[in-house]
Image (cartoon, helix red, strand yellow):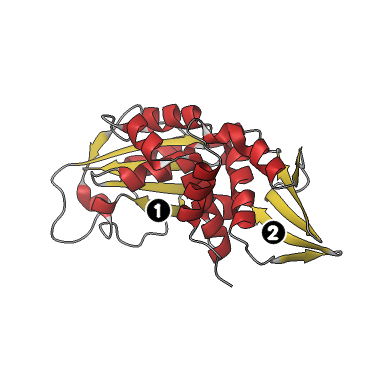
Amino acid sequence: MEAAYDPAAKAKQVLESMGITNLPATHLDEIAQMQHIRVGKQNLPDDPKLSGLLLFCGEKRAILINTHISNSGRINFTFAHELGHHFLQHTPTYYLDGQRGFRCTVEDVQNGGRPKEAEANRFASVFLLPEDQFRLAMVGSALDYTLIATLARQFRVSKHACCNRLLEFTREPYIVIRSRGYAITEIRTSAAARRKLPKLESIPQGTFAYEAITENKNQDAFDEIDAAKWLSGSNLPLHLYEWTRGSWPDNISMTILRW
Protein backbone atom coordinates (compact mmCIF):
# COMPACT_ATOMS: atom_id res chain seq x y z
CA MET A 1 0.00 0.00 0.00
CA GLU A 2 1.35 3.42 -0.96
CA ALA A 3 1.50 6.38 1.40
CA ALA A 4 -1.81 8.14 1.94
CA TYR A 5 0.03 11.42 1.38
CA ASP A 6 3.04 12.70 -0.49
CA PRO A 7 5.83 12.64 2.13
CA ALA A 8 7.26 16.08 1.35
CA ALA A 9 3.86 17.74 1.11
CA LYS A 10 2.74 16.13 4.36
CA ALA A 11 5.86 17.29 6.20
CA LYS A 12 5.28 20.85 5.03
CA GLN A 13 1.62 20.63 6.03
CA VAL A 14 2.54 19.51 9.56
CA LEU A 15 5.01 22.39 9.90
CA GLU A 16 2.46 24.92 8.66
CA SER A 17 -0.46 23.60 10.71
CA MET A 18 1.63 23.84 13.89
CA GLY A 19 3.07 27.23 13.00
CA ILE A 20 6.64 25.96 13.29
CA THR A 21 8.98 28.59 11.87
CA ASN A 22 12.03 27.97 14.05
CA LEU A 23 14.02 24.78 14.66
CA PRO A 24 11.72 21.82 13.86
CA ALA A 25 13.80 19.29 15.84
CA THR A 26 12.82 21.04 19.07
CA HIS A 27 9.12 20.33 18.45
CA LEU A 28 9.22 16.54 18.07
CA ASP A 29 8.01 15.74 21.60
CA GLU A 30 5.30 18.38 21.30
CA ILE A 31 4.01 16.90 18.07
CA ALA A 32 4.00 13.37 19.47
CA GLN A 33 2.05 14.57 22.51
CA MET A 34 -0.52 16.33 20.32
CA GLN A 35 -0.92 13.11 18.33
CA HIS A 36 -1.35 11.12 21.60
CA ILE A 37 1.80 9.12 20.89
CA ARG A 38 3.82 7.94 23.86
CA VAL A 39 7.59 8.22 23.38
CA GLY A 40 10.36 6.23 25.01
CA LYS A 41 14.11 6.41 24.52
CA GLN A 42 16.16 3.47 25.71
CA ASN A 43 19.69 2.15 25.31
CA LEU A 44 19.33 -1.29 23.73
CA PRO A 45 22.89 -2.54 23.14
CA ASP A 46 21.65 -6.11 22.56
CA ASP A 47 19.76 -4.91 19.47
CA PRO A 48 22.29 -2.61 17.75
CA LYS A 49 20.59 -2.84 14.34
CA LEU A 50 17.36 -1.37 15.74
CA SER A 51 16.94 2.37 15.23
CA GLY A 52 13.31 2.85 16.26
CA LEU A 53 9.84 1.37 16.60
CA LEU A 54 6.36 2.70 16.00
CA LEU A 55 3.95 0.37 17.78
CA PHE A 56 0.17 0.13 17.42
CA CYS A 57 -2.14 -1.07 20.18
CA GLY A 58 -5.71 -0.49 19.08
CA GLU A 59 -6.00 3.26 18.56
CA LYS A 60 -2.96 3.94 20.73
CA ARG A 61 0.51 4.62 19.35
CA ALA A 62 3.98 4.49 20.90
CA ILE A 63 7.45 5.31 19.63
CA LEU A 64 10.58 3.67 21.02
CA ILE A 65 14.00 4.98 20.01
CA ASN A 66 17.21 3.04 20.53
CA THR A 67 19.81 5.40 22.00
CA HIS A 68 22.60 2.82 21.84
CA ILE A 69 24.33 5.03 19.28
CA SER A 70 24.39 8.22 21.31
CA ASN A 71 24.11 10.73 18.47
CA SER A 72 21.40 13.31 19.12
CA GLY A 73 21.08 14.13 15.42
CA ARG A 74 20.42 10.50 14.53
CA ILE A 75 17.95 10.20 17.41
CA ASN A 76 16.03 13.24 16.14
CA PHE A 77 15.96 11.85 12.61
CA THR A 78 14.72 8.47 13.85
CA PHE A 79 12.02 10.25 15.87
CA ALA A 80 10.87 12.20 12.79
CA HIS A 81 11.07 9.02 10.69
CA GLU A 82 8.64 7.21 13.03
CA LEU A 83 6.33 10.23 13.00
CA GLY A 84 6.50 10.00 9.23
CA HIS A 85 5.05 6.48 9.30
CA HIS A 86 2.25 7.83 11.51
CA PHE A 87 1.38 10.91 9.43
CA LEU A 88 1.64 9.04 6.13
CA GLN A 89 -0.82 6.46 7.47
CA HIS A 90 1.39 3.56 6.51
CA THR A 91 -0.04 0.08 6.99
CA PRO A 92 2.01 -1.78 9.65
CA THR A 93 4.66 -4.17 8.40
CA TYR A 94 5.85 -5.51 11.78
CA TYR A 95 3.94 -8.18 13.70
CA LEU A 96 5.30 -9.97 16.76
CA ASP A 97 3.70 -11.31 19.95
CA GLY A 98 0.48 -9.43 19.36
CA GLN A 99 2.26 -6.17 18.51
CA ARG A 100 2.10 -4.47 15.16
CA GLY A 101 3.69 -1.40 13.68
CA PHE A 102 7.12 -0.66 12.22
CA ARG A 103 10.53 -1.96 13.22
CA CYS A 104 13.04 0.36 11.60
CA THR A 105 16.69 -0.62 11.37
CA VAL A 106 19.70 1.66 11.17
CA GLU A 107 19.85 0.76 7.47
CA ASP A 108 16.19 1.76 6.99
CA VAL A 109 16.69 5.17 8.56
CA GLN A 110 19.91 5.86 6.68
CA ASN A 111 19.21 4.46 3.22
CA GLY A 112 15.48 3.68 3.12
CA GLY A 113 15.77 0.71 0.79
CA ARG A 114 12.15 -0.35 1.32
CA PRO A 115 9.43 1.94 -0.13
CA LYS A 116 7.71 2.84 3.16
CA GLU A 117 11.05 3.45 4.84
CA ALA A 118 12.11 5.72 1.96
CA GLU A 119 8.85 7.65 2.34
CA ALA A 120 9.34 8.02 6.10
CA ASN A 121 12.90 9.25 5.47
CA ARG A 122 11.63 11.79 2.96
CA PHE A 123 9.11 13.07 5.50
CA ALA A 124 11.82 13.35 8.18
CA SER A 125 14.23 15.16 5.86
CA VAL A 126 11.72 17.77 4.69
CA PHE A 127 10.33 18.22 8.20
CA LEU A 128 13.67 18.63 10.00
CA LEU A 129 15.40 20.56 7.19
CA PRO A 130 12.73 22.88 5.73
CA GLU A 131 13.72 24.16 2.31
CA ASP A 132 13.50 27.90 3.00
CA GLN A 133 15.46 27.73 6.26
CA PHE A 134 18.00 25.28 4.90
CA ARG A 135 18.69 27.12 1.64
CA LEU A 136 19.25 30.34 3.58
CA ALA A 137 21.70 28.61 5.91
CA MET A 138 23.76 27.08 3.09
CA VAL A 139 23.84 30.06 0.71
CA GLY A 140 27.31 31.14 -0.35
CA SER A 141 29.03 28.05 1.08
CA ALA A 142 30.66 25.18 -0.76
CA LEU A 143 29.67 21.62 0.08
CA ASP A 144 32.41 20.23 2.29
CA TYR A 145 32.82 18.57 5.67
CA THR A 146 32.82 21.91 7.50
CA LEU A 147 29.46 22.92 6.01
CA ILE A 148 27.97 19.48 6.67
CA ALA A 149 29.04 19.53 10.32
CA THR A 150 27.94 23.14 10.83
CA LEU A 151 24.44 22.66 9.44
CA ALA A 152 24.00 19.29 11.13
CA ARG A 153 24.64 21.00 14.47
CA GLN A 154 22.44 23.95 13.58
CA PHE A 155 19.44 21.83 12.60
CA ARG A 156 20.18 19.04 15.11
CA VAL A 157 20.24 16.22 12.60
CA SER A 158 22.81 13.61 11.61
CA LYS A 159 25.60 14.53 9.21
CA HIS A 160 24.28 11.78 6.92
CA ALA A 161 20.85 13.42 6.64
CA CYS A 162 22.33 16.90 6.34
CA CYS A 163 24.63 15.90 3.49
CA ASN A 164 21.80 14.26 1.56
CA ARG A 165 19.70 17.43 1.87
CA LEU A 166 22.62 19.60 0.75
CA LEU A 167 22.94 17.52 -2.42
CA GLU A 168 19.31 18.31 -3.27
CA PHE A 169 19.99 22.04 -3.41
CA THR A 170 23.60 22.14 -4.64
CA ARG A 171 23.84 23.30 -8.25
CA GLU A 172 27.44 22.25 -8.79
CA PRO A 173 28.42 18.63 -9.64
CA TYR A 174 29.05 16.69 -6.43
CA ILE A 175 29.12 12.96 -5.71
CA VAL A 176 29.09 11.53 -2.20
CA ILE A 177 30.25 7.93 -1.74
CA ARG A 178 29.78 6.09 1.55
CA SER A 179 31.66 2.88 2.22
CA ARG A 180 32.36 0.21 4.80
CA GLY A 181 35.93 -0.80 4.35
CA TYR A 182 36.46 -0.76 0.60
CA ALA A 183 32.86 -1.84 -0.13
CA ILE A 184 30.63 0.99 -1.35
CA THR A 185 27.34 1.09 0.58
CA GLU A 186 25.69 4.19 -0.90
CA ILE A 187 26.20 6.77 -3.64
CA ARG A 188 24.36 10.11 -3.72
CA THR A 189 24.77 12.92 -6.25
CA SER A 190 23.69 16.47 -6.92
CA ALA A 191 21.50 16.95 -10.00
CA ALA A 192 24.48 18.17 -12.05
CA ALA A 193 26.44 14.97 -11.38
CA ARG A 194 23.78 12.36 -12.10
CA ARG A 195 24.85 9.43 -14.26
CA LYS A 196 28.48 10.60 -14.23
CA LEU A 197 29.75 7.81 -12.00
CA PRO A 198 29.81 4.23 -13.29
CA LYS A 199 28.31 1.48 -11.18
CA LEU A 200 30.90 0.75 -8.54
CA GLU A 201 30.86 -1.85 -5.81
CA SER A 202 34.19 -0.99 -4.24
CA ILE A 203 36.55 1.96 -3.85
CA PRO A 204 38.90 2.05 -6.87
CA GLN A 205 42.58 1.47 -6.24
CA GLY A 206 44.79 4.47 -6.88
CA THR A 207 42.31 6.95 -5.40
CA PHE A 208 42.84 9.06 -2.31
CA ALA A 209 39.85 7.27 -0.78
CA TYR A 210 41.58 3.90 -1.18
CA GLU A 211 44.71 5.29 0.43
CA ALA A 212 42.77 6.90 3.31
CA ILE A 213 40.92 3.64 4.06
CA THR A 214 44.12 1.61 3.87
CA GLU A 215 45.92 3.92 6.29
CA ASN A 216 42.85 4.86 8.39
CA LYS A 217 43.80 8.49 7.89
CA ASN A 218 41.60 11.45 6.93
CA GLN A 219 42.43 13.81 4.10
CA ASP A 220 42.74 17.40 5.29
CA ALA A 221 41.17 19.00 2.21
CA PHE A 222 40.19 18.40 -1.40
CA ASP A 223 43.04 17.02 -3.54
CA GLU A 224 43.02 16.79 -7.32
CA ILE A 225 42.80 13.24 -8.67
CA ASP A 226 43.00 11.76 -12.15
CA ALA A 227 39.35 11.81 -13.24
CA ALA A 228 39.71 8.44 -14.98
CA LYS A 229 40.23 6.81 -11.57
CA TRP A 230 36.56 7.44 -10.78
CA LEU A 231 34.62 8.55 -13.83
CA SER A 232 33.94 7.03 -17.22
CA GLY A 233 32.92 8.28 -20.63
CA SER A 234 34.39 10.63 -23.17
CA ASN A 235 33.40 13.88 -21.43
CA LEU A 236 35.51 13.62 -18.30
CA PRO A 237 35.92 16.83 -16.31
CA LEU A 238 39.38 18.33 -16.61
CA HIS A 239 39.76 18.72 -12.87
CA LEU A 240 38.29 16.26 -10.37
CA TYR A 241 38.80 16.77 -6.64
CA GLU A 242 38.43 14.20 -3.89
CA TRP A 243 38.15 14.37 -0.09
CA THR A 244 37.73 11.35 2.22
CA ARG A 245 37.12 11.22 5.95
CA GLY A 246 36.16 8.25 8.08
CA SER A 247 35.03 6.93 11.40
CA TRP A 248 37.85 4.42 11.42
CA PRO A 249 36.93 2.45 14.57
CA ASP A 250 33.59 1.72 12.84
CA ASN A 251 35.32 0.96 9.51
CA ILE A 252 33.12 3.46 7.65
CA SER A 253 34.08 6.43 5.50
CA MET A 254 32.67 9.05 3.18
CA THR A 255 34.24 10.50 0.04
CA ILE A 256 33.18 13.74 -1.63
CA LEU A 257 33.96 14.21 -5.32
CA ARG A 258 33.52 17.56 -7.08
CA TRP A 259 34.60 19.25 -10.29
Q: Residue furthest bottom?
A: 1
In percent of the image, x 23 and y 43: which residue is there? 172
The residue shown at (22%, 59%) is 232
Which quadrant of the view contains residue 101? Answer: bottom right
- Quarter of the picture holding the N terminus: bottom right
Is there CB contact under 8 Å for labels 2 and 1?
no
> In the rendering, at what x and y percent does residue 215 appear?
44, 35
Above/below status of 235 relative to 46: below
Give the residue furthest to the right: 97
- The crowding category of the residue bearing disc 2, from other C-alpha atoms within 10 Å (few below 14, some 14 to 19, many at least 20), is many
Distance in Å between CA atoms under marks 2 and 1: 26 Å
Asked if residue 86 shows in the view, the reply is yes
Q: Give me the disc on residue 187.
A: 1
- The residue to which callout 2 is attached is 102
Closer-to-camera residue (109/201): 109
Residue 207 visible to an observer of this rendering: no
Which amino acid does the dot numbered 1 rest on? Ile
Q: In front here: 58 or 168?
A: 58
Q: Nearer the viewer, mark 2 or mark 1?
A: 2
- Residue 172 - label: none
Element class at badge 2: strand
Whether residue 129 is situated above or below residue 55 in the rendered picture: above
Residue 197 place in picture, x, y as percent:
29, 57
Asked if residue 160 lies left or right of residue 190, the reply is right
Residue 162 lies, in percent from the top left, at: 45, 39
Q: Amino acid at mark 2?
A: Phe
Instruction: Determine crowd level at label 1: few under 14, some 14-19, many 20+ residues with C-alpha closer than 10 A.
Output: some
The residue shown at (29%, 39%) is: 242
Rendered location of residue 85, percent (x, y): 62, 56
Could you tell whether 146 is left or right of 10 in the image? left
Kindly state the secondary structure of the residue where label 1 is placed: strand
